[in-house]
Image (cartoon, helix red, strand yellow):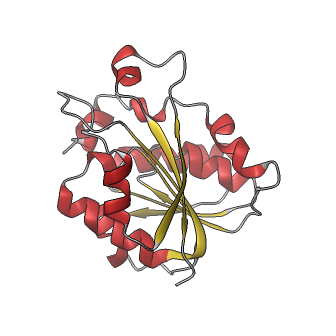
Amino acid sequence: MIPYRLMYALGFAPWERRDVPELWRPLFEGTDAIEPGRALDIGCGSGPDAVHLAGRGWDVTAVDVVDKALDRARQRAVEEGVKVRWVKGSVGKLGRLGLEPGYRLVYDFGCIQGLSDPERRGAASGMTELAAPGARLLLLAFKAGRRLVLPRGMDTEDVLTLLGDRWELERAESAVIADMPPPVRRAEPTLFRLRRGAS
């Protein structure tokens, strides 16, 4: 399990070194674009995605357990002049945080892959309960493998087994970018795009 509190205390959060607007661009453009609605940020960290989406008209709820990360997230939202509902709580107990179901967009950019198996199952169950029928799920994870510092990751089979038959995989695509540190690039980050079934 990844010690997220320690990593934020040390100022080491490589999962937040992304081009946030570029990552979201495909979701907002083209024939498959979706209109703003309710979004749930799983393991929001310092809030770059939550703040970006709120600035585009989304009603965002963002969950994390690390105080330092949430403090920075709140500051980021104030600086950008946007409103986000910040919730301190364990992602592994997502279904027990008192959140209202019906999110049209759920996303996790590297949190669940660093959890223990029971916490992963709790997060997956909570996401399924809270997502509206037809909701989109974006999940970023490294390729499964043993690593000293980075999360052990998840392959396509791991993701589908974890989420169960109520989610359909639309596609999985490489999220490797040129300026990633070599250890992160070698971990082969992959972005999984899924849709929740109608039932």
Q: Give 69 or 192, whichever is nearer the viewer.
A: 192
Residue in view at x 22 percent, y 41 percent: 2
Residue in view at x 66 percent, y 47 percent: 52
Q: Quadrant of residue 93?
A: bottom left
Residue 90 visible in image:
no
Residue 46 placement (x, y as % from top left): 47, 43
Residue 61 visible in image:
yes
71 sits to left or right of 47: left
Residue 8 placement (x, y as % from top left): 33, 36
* Above or below, comparing residue 91 to residue 30 in the picture: below
Residue 102 placement (x, y as % from top left): 57, 79
Image quadrant containing the N terminus: top left
Q: Give 76 or 126, whichever is nearer the viewer.
A: 126
Q: Quadrant of residue 36?
A: bottom right
Q: Residue furthest bottom?
A: 199
Q: Quadrant of residue 149?
A: top left
Residue 10 placement (x, y as % from top left): 29, 28
How many marks can you see? 0
* Above or below, comparing residue 6 to residue 165 in the picture: above
Q: Give 50 or 142, whichever is nearer the viewer.
A: 142
* Above or below, comparing residue 110 to residue 130 in the picture: above
